Image: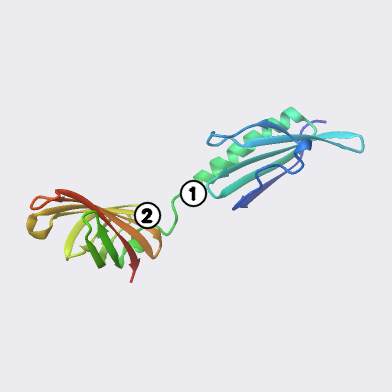
């Protein structure tokens, strides 16, 4: 009779083979290139002890994760339909379970603390030790002190990114829009855009490579 005779799921993490082994034995029946959740699917006919069956392989890379599903059936049409349905269900569950969510190290506990490192700006200025101190944080907001003792509140946390503003620094002359993005749990890059009402240039930028202390 017809129906699925066997099937297997496999998840590979890291670099997966780009081509099916022995390509002369396989026929590519679907291309998932440039399609978000559509896999590449290959098929081949198997003949064993006079019985004909069909093997299908579906493969898709998303980021650093490679998904592969293989399926063997004596009904080619049913197997092709089923492997597509299984793959869609597989990816839907992966998304629901947070497999592609931002790294778990993001969040309040990751930002709190003292960060220090060299800073340069587009005017040619250099500071050997700019300091960012996050004194309080929850999953969405943070407050602290940056550089020359400038305090900020209502910093916004989104994943590995903290945005905050400094108003009226340097005797009311300067405003800063800052973003601090984590590269690892213990290092990150702070970038800023400055508006200066008291000297030229009126607008400039800078960045600092910060490490947790």
Quadrant (top left, top right, bottom left, bottom right) of the C terminus:
bottom left
Q: In x, y percent, where is residue 148?
A: 17, 65
Classify 10 Å Cα crowding around label 1: few (below 14), some (14-19), many (20 and above).
Answer: few
Q: Name the residue under label 2.
A: 160
Q: How many discs appear? A: 2
Residue farthest front in this picture: 124
Mark seen at residue 164? none
Residue at x 64%, y 49% (from the top left corner):
16
Mark 1 or mark 2, which is nearer to you? 2
Mark seen at residue 98? 1
Residue at x 61%, y 45% (from the top left corner):
67
Q: What element carries label 1?
A: loop
**Residue 84, quarter of the rendered image:** top right
According to the image, what is the colour scheme of the structure?
rainbow
Q: In x, y percent, where is residue 170?
A: 11, 59
Residue at x 55%, y 50% (from the top left corner):
64
Q: Is residue 180 left or right of residue 59?
A: left
Q: In this view, does 194 lie above or below 86?
A: below
Classify 10 Å Cα crowding around label 2: few (below 14), some (14-19), many (20 and above).
Answer: many
Q: In this view, does 104 lie to the left or right of 175?
A: right
Q: Is residue 20 left or right of residue 195?
A: right
**Residue 115, quarter of the rendered image:** bottom left
Q: In this view, does 192 lie above or below 95?
A: below
Q: In x, y percent, where is residue 13?
A: 60, 53
Q: In this view, does 159 lie above or below 150?
A: above
Q: Earlier in the sequence, mark 1 or mark 2?
A: 1
Marks 1 and 2, Cα distance to the nearest angstrom?
16 Å
Q: In this view, does 18 lie to the left or right of 183?
A: right
């Amino acid at each position: 009779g017809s129906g699925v005779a066997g099937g297997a799921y496999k998840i590979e993490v890291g670099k997966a083979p780009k081509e099916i082994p022995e390509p002369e034995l396989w026929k590519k029946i679907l291309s998932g290139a440039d399609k978000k959740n559509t896999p590449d699917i290959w098929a081949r006919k198997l003949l064993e002890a006079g019985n004909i069956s069909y093997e299908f392989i579906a493969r898709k890379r998303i980021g650093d994760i490679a998904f592969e599903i293989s399926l063997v059936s004596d009904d080619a049409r049913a197997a092709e339909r089923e492997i597509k349905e299984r793959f869609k269900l597989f990816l839907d569950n992966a998304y629901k379970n947070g497999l592609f969510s931002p790294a778990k190290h993001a969040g309040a506990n990751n930002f709190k603390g003292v960060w220090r490192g060299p800073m340069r700006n587009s005017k040619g200025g250099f500071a050997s030790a700019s300091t960012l101190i996050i004194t309080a944080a929850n999953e969405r907001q943070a407050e602290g002190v940056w550089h020359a003792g400038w305090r900020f509140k209502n910093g916004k946390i989104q994943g590995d990114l903290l945005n905050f503003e400094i108003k009226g620094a340097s005797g009311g002359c300067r405003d800063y829009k800052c973003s601090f993005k984590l590269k690892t749990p213990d290092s990150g890059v702070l970038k800023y855009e400055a508006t200066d009402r008291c000297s030229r240039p009126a607008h400039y930028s800078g960045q600092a490579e910060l490490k947790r202390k």
